[in-house]
């Protein structure tokens, strides 16, 4: 892939200022610099304290009485010293939830898969009286423990490959005999292919989605599904070289964590785009974080049923805003985009997205490319965001800046400042798509956006009516001019060329096949196509 350049558009990038940004030439926007640690090399796995060998686990044959590997893996982790790792080797492991002590890592060896148990009871956290069990739905959610959790307030540790962690999200949930499975959604409301029995984690997520969209309940309901890997208020942690697939919910969730390195991982679960049919792996985000600081996601490959990465920030968090983020040299496929929001009340700032490919492929499963979403219900600010050297193919909306997300309204202020797109090439064959949407209609002040050398192969898809309430600076060559109600385009310093073609460097990047079979229905019982 292309690498970050010291020179961009003929302008030398200077050192970061006190606010963490690199200035450019006079009149040009300020460029985000991302993670202040400037991670440039792949992490090195820690020394192994213990190697456990697989004992012929059979995930397909699991029942409520199957003996799991949880105990021996957890014992090994608990006895491993800080700065060391437990390694799994030699085939298949089948386990319930695991907790990594502070400073201790887990290595999944080559050719080895750690399967998450399908027994709902092992994840149940007995949150409170009256709440539904894990594997059911209710009005609150949150009734499941994650499959793998790093120590809260822990320092160091992480999860390494090159093996695989499989959440078995598309396989039937195993319920205790004294639990009532979740009520089956009506056959008329559910998409074709929804099971009348043997509900999987993904079926539960889709059931909840239909209940809410069809208003089959008086209140909004939430799924109780486990996250695959979670770090809560952890610091200096690493996720490297491992494959995460078929998660019941988010694959990697980070909350209040700092100095996090995600390097060379692969995430693969079915898209929830309608063209895929069933099962749709709804809400299976790739990497999510809330109120995180100094996070790098580099050289990774993600195909999933929700956001590739999702950056959120709650107000009044002791961990401060979400800031200093680098997302670079990555490939993204089916999913909902590189997303900021929808929760930005705590502020999101200094995010650098650099040298990235977003490829919806022939199934056009990339619903969004680069997306910032918020609404007046929560409000908040997003500032100093840079997307540069980005190739996008077959995305419904390659660029979407949305201030009325989910049609929620309110009186809280929304602010998008210094949003900068540089060297973005869009190849869009999606029928009736808009491709570029800059909608500041939900914000009290115009969105501040700059675009340099943003080229789409069909300028007519940059729908003029999709832009509202924005001040847009154009630099270099553009194949379109954003227009719309309340849109001001700065004059001078740019050239309109409707015949301009997306950058040739993207053609080679888009020709590279993904390192895995794009999953439609993954898991032990069905091979991906």
Image (cartoon, helix red, strand yellow):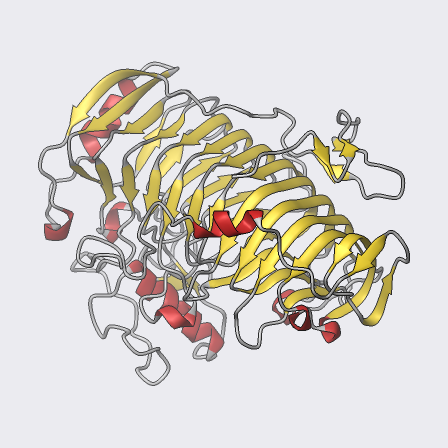
Horizontal side of 134 relative to 421 (left or right) equals: left
Residue at (38, 50) in percent of width and height: 513
Task: Name the spot of residue 385 as percent of width and height, x first.
Answer: 70, 45
Residue at (46, 43) in percent of width and height: 253
Residue at (85, 37) in percent of width and height: 25
Task: Name the spot of residue 58 as percent of width and height, x first.
Answer: 11, 45
Q: How many marks?
A: 0
Task: Name the spot of residue 117 as percent of width and height, x first.
Answer: 22, 46
Task: Name the spot of residue 300 as percent of width and height, x first.
Answer: 45, 40
Q: Which of 211/396 is in front?
A: 396
Horizontal side of 385 relative to 355 (left or right) equals: right
Residue 77 visible to the viewer = yes
Q: Say if 97 sits above or below 332 in the image.
A: above
Residue 343 visible to the viewer = no
Q: Quadrant of residue 349?
A: top right
Horizontal side of 315 relative to 271 (left or right) equals: right
């Amino acid at each position: 892939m292309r690498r970050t350049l010291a020179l961009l558009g003929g302008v030398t990038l200077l050192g970061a200022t006190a606010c963490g940004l690199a200035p450019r030439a006079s009149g040009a926007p300020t460029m985000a610099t991302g993670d202040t640690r400037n991670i440039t090399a792949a992490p090195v796995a820690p020394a192994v304290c213990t190697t456990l060998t697989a004992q012929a686990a059979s995930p397909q044959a699991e029942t409520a009485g199957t003996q799991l590997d949880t105990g021996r893996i957890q014992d090994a982790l608990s006895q491993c010293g800080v700065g060391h790792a437990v390694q799994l080797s030699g085939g298949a492991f089948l386990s319930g939830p695991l907790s990594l002590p502070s400073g201790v890592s887990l290595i999944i060896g080559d050719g080895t898969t750690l399967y998450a148990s399908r027994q709902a009871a092992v994840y149940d956290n007995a949150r409170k009286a009256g709440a539904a069990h894990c594997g059911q739905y209710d009005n609150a959610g949150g009734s499941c423990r994650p499959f793998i959790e790093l120590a809260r307030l822990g320092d160091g540790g992480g999860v390494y490959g090159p093996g695989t962690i499989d959440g078995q999200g598309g396989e039937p949930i195993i319920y205790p005999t004294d639990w009532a499975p979740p009520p089956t959604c009506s056959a008329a409301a559910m998409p074709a292919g929804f099971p009348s029995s043997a509900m999987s984690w993904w079926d539960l997520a889709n059931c909840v989605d239909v209940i809410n969209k069809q208003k089959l309940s008086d209140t909004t309901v939430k799924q109780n599904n486990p996250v695959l890997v979670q770090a809560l208020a952890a610091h200096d942690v690493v996720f490297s070289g491992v494959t995460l697939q078929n998660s019941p919910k988010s694959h990697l969730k980070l909350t209040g964590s700092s100095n996090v390195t995600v390097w060379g991982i692969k995430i693969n679960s079915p898209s929830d785009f309608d063209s895929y049919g069933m099962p749709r792996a709804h809400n299976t985000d790739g990497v999510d974080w809330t109120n995180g600081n100094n996070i790098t996601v580099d050289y990774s490959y993600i195909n999933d049923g929700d956001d590739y990465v999702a950056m959120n920030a709650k107000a009044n968090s002791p961990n401060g805003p979400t800031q200093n983020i680098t997302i670079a040299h990555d490939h993204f496929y089916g999913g909902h985009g590189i997303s900021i929001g929808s929760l930005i009340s705590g502020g999101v700032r200094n995010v650098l997205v650099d040298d990235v490919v977003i490829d919806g492929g022939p199934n056009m499963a990339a619903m969004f490319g680069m997306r910032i979403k918020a609404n007046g219900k929560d409000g908040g600010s997003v500032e100093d965001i840079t997307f540069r050297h980005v190739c996008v193919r077959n995305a419904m909306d390659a660029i979407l800046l949305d201030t009325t997300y989910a049609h929620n309204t309110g009186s809280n202020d929304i602010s998008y400042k210094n949003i900068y797109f540089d060297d973005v090439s869009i190849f869009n064959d999606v029928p009736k798509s808009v491709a570029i949407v800059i909608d500041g209609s939900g914000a009290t002040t115009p969105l501040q956006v700059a675009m340099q050398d943003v080229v789409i192969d069909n300028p007519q898809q940059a729908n003029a009516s999709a832009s509202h309430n924005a001040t847009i600076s154009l630099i270099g060559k553009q194949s379109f001019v954003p227009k719309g109600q309340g849109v001001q385009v700065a004059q001078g310093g740019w050239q309109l060329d409707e015949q301009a073609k997306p950058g040739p460097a993207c053609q080679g990047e888009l020709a590279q096949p993904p390192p895995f079979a794009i999953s439609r229905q993954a898991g032990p019982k069905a091979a991906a196509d």
